[in-house]
Image (cartoon, coloured by chain):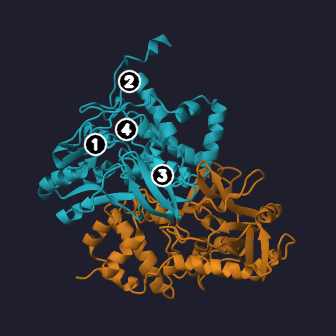
Amino acid sequence: MERFITKTNLTRLAEDLAATCRVLAPVATGGTVTFHRLRSGMSIDLHSRMAAVSPKAATFPQTEELLQVTREGEDKKPEIHETLPQGKNVVIGCRPCGARGKLIFNPVYETEKIKDPYFIQRRDNTIFITLACDRPETTCFCHSVGGGPADTAGSDVLLTLVGEGYVARSVTPEGEEIMKHALFEDAGDKGKEADAKNARALEMMGPAHDYSSAPAKILARFDDMDFWTAQSAKCISCGACTYMCPTCYCFNITDDDLGLTSRRIRTWDNCMSHTFTLEGSGHNPRPTKAHRLKNRVGHKFSYYPDLHKKVIACCGCGRCIKQCPAGVDIRQIVNAAQEYSE
Amino acid sequence: MSQLDDLKAAIKDRLGELDCVIGWEQGYDALHATPLFIRSEADLDRLIIGPLAVHNLSTYLPGLKGKKVGIVVKGCDSRSVIELLNEKLINRDDVVIFGLCCDGVVSQRKIRAALSADPGFVESVTVGADDLKITVAGQNATLKLADVKADKCLTCQHPDAVLSDVLIGAKHGAPALASLACQDEFEAKSDAEKFAFWQETMSRCIRCYACRNACPMCVCRDYCIATSRDPLWVSQENSPTENMMFQMIHVSHLAGRCTECGECERACPVDIPLMLLRRYMNKQVKDVFEHQAGTALDQTPPLFTFKVEEERIHERGW
């Protein structure tokens, strides 16, 4: 289905949806743009810049309560309450990379043997209304990892800015359902303009980099700690890259004990952290930042594609590059491994 | 010779005796520099200095303890080196300090605010004596350096490296503002207003710990109280309360040690104005202990010492 919606009506649509769903959209606060749950008085900011943080939290919140435990008294048996996520969510205005990012979670969190009910429930109850990009940033490389500025993977509706509104195209039946709303109008021949715009954006990205040799080349450097020490020299081993990444799915589970009540929470974990692989014995198989960065790059560009049909676990959004305090560029590291010769 | 040529010559002189020298090179685009680890003369060709070379490289020094390392420092960065020396976190004999006389660095945030298009679309940058000529998304803009200077440069009292083995450039000092309007404005708020501000601001903190790891004085690193699992001191929950709790721990641990290099705020991916906390704490430390971290060798941070009676704290008079 192809329709058109004006900028004003998209805001109205968001307000309308917010009455029955949790609507997440980019909002500008304090000089930055991040996804917020839309409440009255907030205005959506789709165009000033790409949101600093990805829309990952919509399907994989930074803190997720897994269960609650209550006890009547110290000697009583504790009662355990399930806390599966309820309600529907709509993400409006994420970019194609952000929508595609969540697909990386699927083969991990939904297998024949293991199903993560929290992720699956959120994923299946979340609609992504995505905005196609009209110009690549210096850190964008979505087209090298299977995506593109108007990629539809992971989206339910794709919007392309044309004049004072958006050409909307449904990708899934759920997206089509939303587009039946009266605020959408006939697209006329604006579709052609949208196609031209999307083609121009892809052209502006230049030639795509070929990552097909990366899995084997990175693995070939696995034991070369000199290589990884040099590549990680400027890394400060914080977690900014992992926390902003739409495809990073590692988590930590802790119990917050509050006396007679406690809760088990799952929070985003961070493979740049010393505690990520710290074993109970005190031994840490990844004791330095070089070991940790090797894992991050290797996971995305080598081990994951080897396990999951050659899919690279990176959506090319470039947030890890743009927001890295030290300017570590994952593209450069993978290139260095690909170009390395003994 | 330019300041950069002088610096290159000075590094070339000492490179043979060092494992590496840390400086800056151009980063992923024309507007961003990135740390450069110089190991050979060939690497020297990539070295840059100037207003885009923002990182305080002394952050790397404690992690390189035991190696012979050269480091290029601006005035503010040299204060961090002094503080690391004073706290015996690095050895003076292992560090060769290439000091710069600095004219200030840019704030990427101010550049972002000053441009009509997102600097993510930057195409080229020319650094002039007083301005930056930037082409972004096909549009040309000229930004005055004075308008996009980092806040820390506006109040900097030590633009020339305070401690160095080689000082590059001519010492010039700098007229500095006594305080920043944004700080005064914030401190004039009521407690309730401040609380509301931090609640709102901390709701976007993602606890990525970039502020912590970029800080040259945050030396617990892998053993930070915020991420320790045994014992689990701080909840891993991401909420304004827990996030603020972490920042309170952070600022308390820096009392009397923070050199106001601004790296915490610069590193924050969601623009949390952490320097509001740092500057406030530093003001208290200066008022109470007459102490400014990293301004002289052999100073001891006040909270590292114990006196039965502090000269400026009149306990008995309470």
Of the residues tagged 2 and 3, which is closer to the observer? Answer: 3
Label 4 and label 2: CA atoms lie apart by 15 Å
**Which one is earlier in the sequence, the residue at label 1 or at label 4?**
1
Residue B289 numbered mark, or none = 2
Q: CA distance from mark 1 to mark 4?
A: 10 Å
Relative height, residue A102 to residue B25 (above, below): below
- Mark 1 and mark 3: Cα distance apart in space: 34 Å
Q: Residues within 10 Å of mark 3 (few under 14, many from 20)?
A: some
Per the image, label 3 sits on a secondary structure element best described as strand
Please name the color used to draw chain A: orange
- Badge 4 is on which residue? B259
- Residue B81's disc is 1
Q: Name the amino acid, label 1.
A: Val
* Residue located beneath label 3 in the image: B142
Secondary structure category for the residue under label 1: helix
Please state if B127 lies on the left or on the right of B47 as rendered: right
Q: Nearer the viewer, mark 2 or mark 1?
A: 1
- In this view of the protein, can residue A316 be seen by the observer? yes
Q: Residue at x 43, y 81 (%)?
A: A209
Q: Earlier in the sequence, mark 4 or mark 3?
A: 3
| Residue B39, image quadrant | bottom left
